[in-house]
Image (cartoon, rainbow, N blue to C red):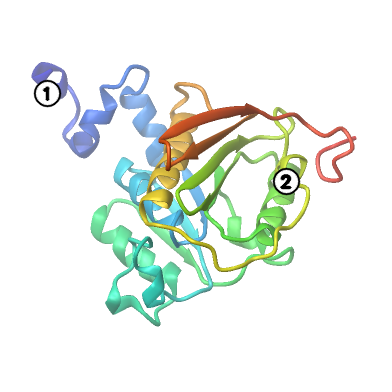
Amino acid sequence: MGCVLKKISFENERYARQMIISGWGDEGQRRINNATVFIAGAGGLGSPAAVYLAAAGVGTIIICDDGEPELSNLNRQILHSDADIGVNKALSAKDSLNMLNPNVTVRPVTERINKNSVESAVADADIMVDCLDNFETRHVLNEFAVKNSIPFVHAGIHGLSGQVTFIHSPETPCLRCVFPGAVPKDVFPVVGVTPGIIGTIEAAEVLKWIVGIGENLKNILLIWDGDTMDFQKIDIKKDPDCPVCGK
């Protein structure tokens, strides 16, 4: 193992252990270093997703959130601390991620995502990550992803459970096919480990797609039940009458 590590350039010493994964190597790391990832939300899901994408060396992370950390967020939103209460989450996330890996460019977006702002927010991102807590905004991102053929990793959490799927229209159903309605936003129970687990799965999906290894959760909804520690895969299909991606 030591001999393999010595062959990796000094510039990539930070990423040496991931670069020896089969199919990764110099080319895979180059792809990661050149990638731009858009993360919608710098809260419970966005924190672990952003941390592990930054640690892996994603070249540019665009992180979007118009909110500010509150004390009740800190059991799960690990990008922020007590000192960040009252500071915009995207700006706080930038500081934390720059401390973690100064080689990553972090572009904070502090405005709310809507149909008028989504294009400028996502900008030149190669892939989008849904780390939101409401379906209204998720559907805005989904429509943008379908229209522009951008991969879109969706996740949701509640208590000790969560779900993840990899959306890339027209290969897969879009979010509207699977969740046609907008569930009302409400205060829901959550312990920090739940977004930790689900957010890191989102990061894994992004890294696999960028490098071009493994299989993404296309046409599959992965459900995690923390009470029983069970993972379940559910096949999902396109709705031919979907108003977003259907005919």
Horizontal side of 122 relative to 72 (left or right) equals: right
The answer to whether 172 is drawn above or below residue 95 in the figure is above
Front label number (1 vs 2): 2
Residue placed farthest to the left in the image? 2
Horizontal side of 123 relative to 85 (left or right) equals: right
Q: Residues within 10 Å of mark 1 (few under 14, many from 20)?
A: few
Residue placed farthest to the bottom in the image? 86
Q: CA distance from mark 1 to mark 2?
A: 48 Å
Question: The residue under label 1 is which amino acid type?
Answer: Lys
The residue lying at 29 percent from left, 60 percent from top is 98
The answer to whether 56 is drawn above or below residue 140 in the figure is above
Q: In the rendering, which numbered label is found on residue 6?
A: 1
The residue lying at 57 percent from left, 27 percent from top is 233
Q: In the rendering, which numbered label is found on residue 179?
A: 2
Q: Quadrant of residue 47?
A: bottom left
The residue lying at 47 percent from left, 41 percent from top is 202
Horizontal side of 164 relative to 134 (left or right) equals: left
The local secondary structure at tag 1 comes to helix
The local secondary structure at tag 2 comes to loop
Horizontal side of 185 relative to 49 (left or right) equals: right
The answer to whether 72 is drawn above or below residue 40 in the figure is below
Residue 217 point in image, percent of width and height: 56, 29
Q: Earlier along the polypeptide chain: callout 1 or callout 2?
A: 1
Question: The residue under label 2 is which amino acid type?
Answer: Phe
Q: Quadrant of the C terminus?
A: top right
Q: Quadrant of residue 11?
A: top left
